[in-house]
């Protein structure tokens, strides 16, 4: 399990470095750059919340049955 966590961490760090480098090279004002940087974080949080919501309802017991 630790091996997979390390591998996932390395992949995420490489993705983050590449994303930061590509956003830094864009010719935009500072406000738009900061908004563009936050988009992946917002997507990840939305996916995580949807996963938690789905898994919570999947394992809950229906009191009507």
Image (cartoon, helix red, strand yellow):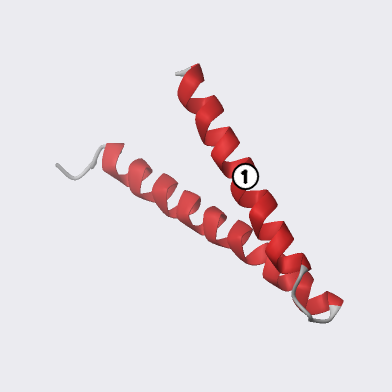
Residue in the image at 78% along x and 66% along y: 24
Q: Judge from the rendering whether residue 47 lies leftward or rightward of residue 6; answer left or right.
A: left
Q: Judge from the rendering whether residue 62 lies leftward or rightward of residue 53; answer left or right.
A: left
| Relative to 34, residue 3 above or below | above
Q: Please, which residue is most extreme toward the right here? A: 30
Q: Please, which residue is most extreme toward the top here? A: 2
Residue in the image at 78% along x and 69% along y: 34
Q: Judge from the rendering whether residue 31 lies leftward or rightward of residue 45; answer left or right.
A: right
Where residue 29 appears, as percent x and y from the top left, is 84, 81
Q: Which residue is mark 1?
A: 14
Where residue 15 appears, as percent x and y from the top left, is 59, 50
**Quarter that holds the C terminus:** top left
Query: Tag 1's secondary structure?
Result: helix
Residue in the image at 44% along x and 18% along y: 1
Q: In this view of the protein, which residue sits in the foreground, 8 or 44? A: 8
Where residue 61 appears, as percent x and y from the top left, is 26, 37
Location of residue 58 (image quadrant) = top left
Q: In this view of the protein, which residue sits in the foreground, 21 or 45? A: 21
């Amino acid at each position: 399990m630790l091996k997979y966590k390390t591998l996932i961490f390395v992949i995420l760090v490489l993705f983050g470095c590449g994303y930061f480098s590509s956003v830094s090279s864009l010719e935009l004002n500072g406000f738009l750059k900061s908004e563009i940087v936050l988009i992946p974080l917002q997507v990840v949080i939305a996916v995580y919340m949807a996963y938690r919501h789905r898994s919570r309802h999947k394992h809950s017991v229906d009191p009507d049955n």
